[in-house]
Amino acid sequence: MRIGELARRAGTSTRTLRYYDQHGLLRSRRADNGYRAFDEAELRVVDEIRALLAVGFDLDDIRPFVACLRAGHATGDVCPDSVAVLRRKLAEVDTCVDRLNAVRDQLHQQLTEAIAHREKTCLTRPAP
């Protein structure tokens, strides 16, 4: 299929597909007229790429998943290299969550102290 049809079927733009192609994530061949031609299997690859990008993976992270699909697996996350990327990404997310929880705890403590200080200040001021 030509790039326009792949873009339409994948729900993305031809520009995006060219970008993936330039980064070696898609396989295309040039027809005699110079147009890119894609096999049906590339639709699944594009779906995988877009799903992984949507949850924060970058193009380098995605390469093992694409390779896994190209090896004939139904999903890109069952190969050892993909599992390693998933583990690393999960550790990164856990670290972020831990940092956010620490910030939340600090904000909660500050808020509690501010409210207590405000109530104490308001109770000790004489009425006009």
Image (tube, rainbow, N blue to C red):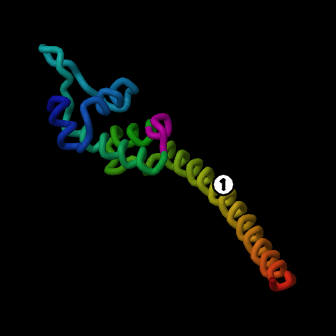
Residue 7: quadrant of the picture: top left
- The answer to whether residue 19 is above or below residue 110 is above
For image coordinates 38% across by 39% down, the residue present is 66
What secondary structure characterizes most of the magenta part? helix
Q: Which residue is mark 1?
A: 95
- The answer to whether residue 127 is above or below residue 54 is below
Residue 99 percent location from the top left of the image: 69, 57
Quick check: 8 left or right of 79? Answer: left
Q: Quadrant of the C terminus?
A: bottom right
Q: Secondary structure at mark 1?
A: helix
For image coordinates 62% across by 53% down, the residue present is 91
For image coordinates 59% across by 48% down, the residue present is 88
Residue 100 percent location from the top left of the image: 65, 59
Quick check: 64 left or right of 128? Answer: left
Please name whichever residue, 56 or 1, is drawn nearer the observer in this view of the structure.
56
Q: Amino acid at mark 1?
A: Thr
Residue 43: quadrant of the picture: top left
Residue bounds of the magenta highlight? 57-62
Please name whichever residue, 67 or 106, is drawn nearer the observer in this view of the structure.
106
